[in-house]
Amino acid sequence: MLRSLDASMAMNLRPFLCILGLAALIAGPVRAQIAAVESPSGPVPAGPFIVVDAASGETLLERNSGMYWYPASLTKMMTIYVVFEELKAGRLTLSEQLAFSQNARAKEASKLGLAPGQTVTVEQGLQALIAISANDVATAFSERVSGTEAAFAQHMTDSARRIGMTATTFRNANGLPDQGQVTTARDMAILAVALATNFPQYYGYFGTRHVYVGNQKVGKGVKFLDLYSPYADGLKTGFICASGFNIVGSAVRDGRRLVAAAFGFRRADLRDEFLVRLFDEAFALKTAGSRRKVWQLSNGGGGPATVLPYGECGAIRYDMPGDAAWLGTFGDWRTARNAFDAGQAKLGSLGLRPGKEWILPVTVNKATRQAAIIADLEPQAAQKLCADYQARKSFCQVKKPVEMSAPYGGFWR
């Protein structure tokens, strides 16, 4: 395994920093780019990505990993890193109480929503950062450790520099939008390795699925852990409109740990599925250590790109590469869901890959009905399913992704 990254990675970085700085002056900034990655149903727009061997630092796969990006809630990985430092030094304990201020309460969701003066334990706070990405908890930690959010953000940035995150700047502890808060996929991979390597006694918290606050169980954890079970063991997802859906994950197979970061997806499920494919590809590589180390990669160019303009962010969007099968439009959600379930079962009986649920509310003349749609199908799957339905004189229409855009009045039936 890598020795403590605070020492070894910083040492390894020094010879390269001057070289990389000169290279940046010569080459100029890398242009922000969102480009397609492959999926079973078609190309998916995505941002930078990287996969790193945690033991050697070898970069197995990467694209634009030094491009600036907004970290969103991946920020909380560094918040947690600082909390782990405090625990290791004895300045915090897992059982002590973490108090919430009015400033913490005022943060946007996702959050626990505790009133000023209420408390959770430090351990519950860590669990809440992972299980529900609680913004108020991140602020509470920042005030507990450094007195103010601004001071804690500087502490985070200083810690980032110390472990080799040369292009990352933090402005808050939670990842809420701030144009000055930027990172890169390269830097987030370094942080993931540092968390696993420097804090093995605490790293298991990144597998948290839920947290109990009083008698209430909250949270759902990181879906990637289930998608890539039994290999995946953490870490964190993040989203704001500008960044799109981001993820940093870790997986262990045959005693070998890889970490990966993937940024800039328009849907969380497409992001998670891509990360699974990325890990599979990386674990299958036989490189004999011949590829560049993560700290040798150029860093801090271009970007950050805007994945979802704020005007689009809350709208109903298809954003999937595959075709859709429209199975009808119904008076209530449950009937539409039953139609979707029946269609999925039929795909299975035909030996076809299942699609994704897309129950679409369709409003015409102030009346709303629910369209049952199986989304993100391979073209032949959508065609075969609808052919089967039509042979039984049941309704089914194939829709191309370009047809799946607002307004959705054409799905009234």
Image (cartoon, helix red, strand yellow):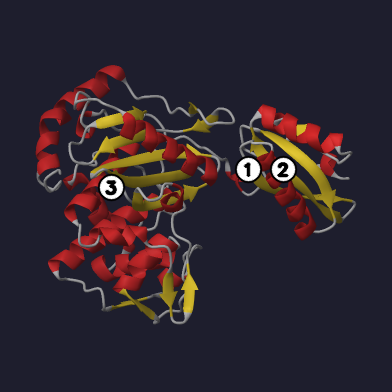
Q: Secondary structure at mark 3?
A: helix
Q: Splitting the image into 4 quarters, where does residue 337 fall?
A: bottom right
Residue 346: mark in rendering: 2
Residue 187 visible, this orientation: yes
**Residue that carries the numbered disc 1 in the rendered image:** 312
84 in relation to 185, above or below: below
State the image coordinates of residue 227 (x, y, percent, origin top left).
46, 48
Determine the residue positioned at 34% across, 34% down.
50
- Give the CA distance from mark 3 to mark 2: 42 Å
State the image coordinates of residue 377 (x, y, percent, origin top left).
65, 35
- Give the CA distance from mark 1 to mark 3: 31 Å
Q: Secondary structure at mark 1?
A: helix
> Amino acid under label 2?
Lys
Determine the residue positioned at 31% across, 71% down.
123
**Residue that carries the numbered disc 3 in the rendered image:** 192
Mark 2–mark 1 CB contact (< 8 Å): no
Answer with mark 2 or mark 1, whichever residue precedes in sequence. 1
Q: Secondary structure at mark 2?
A: helix
Mark 1–mark 3 CB contact (< 8 Å): no
User: Which label sits in the foreground, 2 or 1?
Assistant: 2
User: Considering the image in quadrants, where does the C terminus appear?
Assistant: top right
> Amino acid under label 1?
Glu
User: Which label sits in the foreground, 1 or 3?
Assistant: 3
In the image, taking residue 320 as reference, residue 228 lies left or right, namely: left
Determine the residue positioned at 85% across, 35% down.
390
160 in relation to 389, above or below: below
